[in-house]
Amino acid sequence: MEKNKPFLVQEPDQMPKPCFDEKEFSDYAYPFPIPGNVAHKWGYVLTSWGCPRKCRHCSEVVRKTTGTILRTRNPVRVADEIASLLQAGADAICFEDDSLFCNRRHFLNICEEIIRRGLHFPWISHARPDELDEERIAAAAKAGAVLLKVGVESGASNIIETIGKSASGEVWLDKVEKGFALLQQYNVGSVALFMVGIPHETEADVEKSIALAKKIKPDYIQIQIFCTYPDSSFFDQLEAPLYPEGLYHYLRPAWSPSRIPPDKLPLLQSRFYNSFYLRPEYVIRHIRQFWRFYTNIPNIIRIMNWINLMRRNLFAPLKL
């Protein structure tokens, strides 16, 4: 079976200017509290298409854009779009680039344009640990960054090398620690993104990830169970079984390339979450920082709906 290749946006600045409606904003709120004032109406912006990184587990199934060549937008047009969103009623911006920090000059130019125009708004984005140098973090903080989602992936150096994040896992982990320390120094919040069930990973490797998460002290963690998608470079090498589409389940994997049994991965995922979030020091710090969010009625309703959704997904039977 042949599938049509995805259309690549080669010249982002030739895309038409989008129109925004305030009614749309509240339907796409960020689910967790962010530092600063409570944000209710979120606008979403792409400043670039494509990612030049060579991560072996990556798939366009989960990426925001397509292509391996980074195609950037003019920072002036980006700022124009942000201004339009704010004028239409948005009170926070989520940059949806696969990695907003990827091209240093492009990123700094966007920050400079935001600052030059006097645009004041909280924003969040994705970043890699090896992009978190002081120049970029300082510029981000000055331009309004309040939260970065950072793909740490693992606390085991050999696993970092396995998935192609860095030629040296030790260098990567060093940049993780330094990057998160800088984020705290500049009062920028963070979400540390990890995976479990990575090829060749052991339970001991997962324990290293848990220890690292506690050490770098992010505001949140998210733990994804590794999935080998057919378009990833890992897929053919690992000889992953091609299951029906419905079995690519983010909570209960039908197969795993790690050294951990598939049915144990959800338990390790839960242990990871519980050992991080249920620590008294974390709970106290979180409530002190984000209490305004939890006293807001719309957010309480949204959280309850999210919990109910997770409960249904977690306990739904998996048909093989």
Image (tube, helix red, strand yellow):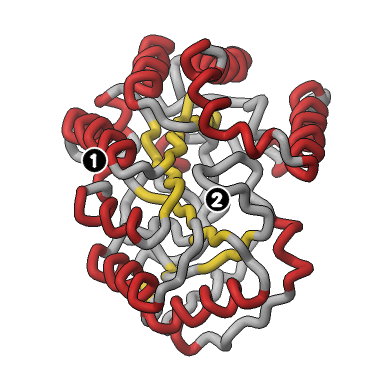
Q: Which mark is residue 239?
A: none
Read off the residue under disc 2: 62
Tell me where residue 107 appears, x and y as whole percent.
31, 66
Q: Please state which of residues 318 and 293 is positioned toward the viewer in this rendering.
A: 293
Q: Is residue 40 above or below residue 244?
A: below
Q: Quadrant of the N terminus?
A: bottom right
Q: Is residue 108 above or below residue 35?
A: below
Mark 1 residue crowding within 10 angstroms, few (<14) / some (14–19) / many (20+): some
Residue at image position (44%, 16%) is 259
- Of the two numbered discs 1 and 2 on the same chain, state the one appearing first in sequence: 2
Q: CA distance from mark 1 to mark 2?
A: 20 Å
Residue at image position (25%, 25%) is 157
Residue at image position (50%, 32%) is 220
The reply, left or right, for residue 289 in relation to residue 109 is right
Tell me where residue 317 appears, x and y as whole percent.
82, 23
Q: In the image, what residue type sits under mark 1?
A: Ser
Q: In the image, what residue type sits under mark 2?
A: Val
Which type of secondary structure does the marked residue at label 1 adopt?
loop
Tell me where residue 71 appears, x and y as whole percent.
37, 74
The reply, left or right, for residue 295 in relation to residue 149 is right
Q: Please state which of residues 152 and 85 is positioned toward the viewer in this rendering.
A: 85
Residue 165 seen in the current view: no
Read off the residue under disc 1: 166
Question: Residue 108 sits in which quadrant?
Answer: bottom left
Q: Quadrant of the C terminus?
A: top right
Which type of secondary structure does the marked residue at label 2 adopt?
loop
Question: Are the residues at dot 1 and dot 2 in contact (C-beta closer than 8 Å)?
Answer: no
Question: Residue 50 sits in which quadrant?
Answer: bottom left
Mark 2 residue crowding within 10 angstroms, few (<14) / some (14–19) / many (20+): few
Tell me where residue 19 appears, x and y as whole percent.
66, 82
